[in-house]
Image (tube, rainbow, N blue to C red):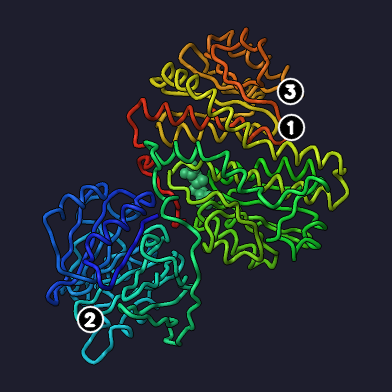
Amino acid sequence: MCGIIGYIGKRKVVPVLIDGLKRMEYRGYDSAGLAYIRDGEIVAVKSMGKIARLEQQLQDVDAESHIGVAHTRWATHGEPNEKNAHPHLDCTGRIAVVHNGIVENYRALRKYLQKQGHRFTTETDTEVIAHLIEEYYKKDIPFIDALTSALLQIEGTYGLAILNADEPNKLYAARHGSPVIIGKGEKENFVASDAAAIIRYTNRVIYLNEGEVAEVTDDGFEIFTLRKDRVKPEVQKLTMTLQELEKGGYPHFMLKEIFEQPATVRNSFRGRLNLEMGTARLNGLKSHLDVIEKLKRIVITACGTSWHAALIGEYLIEELARIPVEVEYASEFRYRSPVLDDGTAVFVISQSGETADTLAALREAHNQGVSVFGIVNVVGSTIARETDAGVYIHAGPEIGVASTKAFTSQITVLALTALMLGRRRGIVSTERGYELASHLAKIPEKIKWILDSQTANIKKIAEKYHKKNNALFLGRGINFPVALEGALKLKEISYIHAEGYPAAEMKHGPIALIDENMPVFFIAIDDLMYKKVVSNIEEVRSRKGKVIAIATLGNEEIRRYADDVVYIPETDYLLSPLLTVIPMQLFAYYTAVLRGCSIDQPRNLAKSVTVE
Ligand code: M6R
């Protein structure tokens, strides 16, 4: 959700903060703001909209300040206007707070603080934090004590960076439920919600744990619990590179990330496939394999695109390992008292590793005493750290809000997991294992083939349909979740209403929507259900719907039924989602471009949803 950054050190602070904000803009982009200390006073500058507007406002400011905090916002409480933009100040204007998270008891706190005489100027939940610290910050009370006392009153989640004008050589940070890292530099230190904001300056970081507070100066830092016990920090090295955070010549991150997929899928299986033995090895799960292979049931929980990957995982694991799988929306899982009996384990899937709903589901599973395994992209993220074990998907930083390369990497890891379990449980033979492993090894070149040979075609299809208001995506079997994903991609970035359905379900309702204005995407590859899908296509055609078929290369017959055809190379049915999704990602992308939408930062969305 929101991105926060704080800096103290040898550089002028404003350019560092602006640069950091730009790298986190994908976390939220309703408004932005920063505050720095100059001549013992806090100067705050805020702006509605994107970071570029804030930057413009600051272009003539050459602030001789070396300490500050900044924020890019995804609004939760209060309209996304300039007033509600962070930083938020106390009554004296000497305490500035930037916050990622939600203060759930802010109404009660605000009422209490108003009674004590505090004047509020915004509608946000965050403003209570500044006033609450002010309330405790009395003569002879050290600021850190006032801060911890205030934080103990807060219910909800926070990742915070805080300035106190009385201490121009100290920056404060705190974490509860929203990620915060400290970046360790030479004669400078950073606080951020996201490694991307600081990787340009340092790759040495400390992840704050839940309920920890940090006091940061230019040459060091100290970490405490809220009860003021000192914590020994563990410095870790980031593997991310600055280059991975650049667009690399592409107009948008989303397009770059779509075109990265031959490489990212390869990275996901690199070193993990054993062709000779027809199996896979996943070191992250190694020490738990004896338990996992004997499971009676697996529950996979996730949100959004990761949830779609989970549905594909259900097909893969049930087919190859014969372990019953249930897939749950993480947001529902936590609140419906799930039955997690002996012999059940939970897998959580998350690109960011910070999604609040998924994290809450993970914690619910732990509370019920079952093991939780992670399939995560962001190294060192909260979900990665709280799971019992897990596998990184190695897709590299995904910046576009619409998830693309993380999806294919998640499927790759799920296929590896299913293959490994199937082999260990004696369900998949060495021959079948070899066949699957060899098909998987060829997926990168097949994705590349689609990107090279079908992109122009897909662009034309987008030109034809980009003015439509609705679209349907239909698929069967393991490609049904891909239909859901195709619809989600289109909705997210082009704002066209789209639905994904199992193709055969169409006749039970959605068929009523079909007329000459309805583009219908069919995943009609050469599998066991091909003939049935062709019948579904006929049903759409006879009602004048427009058919776009994603078909297997070499199938010329399909041209008789479809208005447009996009080809994908042949592969094993179980791996086909890795190919069928590519045209859908490209279609959503080019449609959104033609509609003039904000591709990497679609309205109302944020890359990582750290509120429930
Ligand atoms: O980081 P996560 O994988 O946990 O995020 C889950 C969803 O918020 C995410 O997939 C979202 O649906 C994307 N915007 C999809 O493109």
Tags 1 and 3 touching, CB below 8 Å = no
What residue is pinned by disc 1? 572
- Say if 235 sits above or below 241 in the image: below
Position of the N terminus, as image quadrant, is: bottom left
First in sequence, mark 1 or 3: give its number: 3
Q: Amino acid at mark 2?
A: Glu
Residue tagged 3: 529
Task: First in sequence, mark 2 or 1: give its number.
Answer: 2
Mark 3 beta carbon near ligand 1 (under 8 Å): no
Query: Separation of disc 2 and disc 1 at Cα?
Result: 63 Å
Identify which residue, 374 or 544, lies in the foreground.
Answer: 374
Q: Is residue 325 left or right of residue 6?
A: right
Q: Position of residue 109 (x, y in %)?
A: 31, 71
Q: Amino acid at mark 3?
A: Met
Q: Image point 23% across, 86% down: which residue?
A: 138
Side of 261 where 66 appears, left or right: left
300 lies above or below 591: below
Q: Residue 385 location, x and y as percent?
A: 57, 66
Residue of label 2: 167
Q: Is residue 322 among the parts visible in the rendering? A: no
Residue 524 in the image, given as x and y percentages of width and height: 65, 21
Q: Residue furthest bottom?
A: 140
Residue 403 screen position, x and y as percent: 50, 42
* Residue at the spot 48% in from the left edge and 63% down from the top edge: 238
User: What separation in Å lies between label 1 and label 3 (alpha carbons)?
Assistant: 14 Å
Question: Image point 32% across, 29% down: which residue?
Answer: 596
| Residue nearest the viewer, comparing 263 with 477 | 263
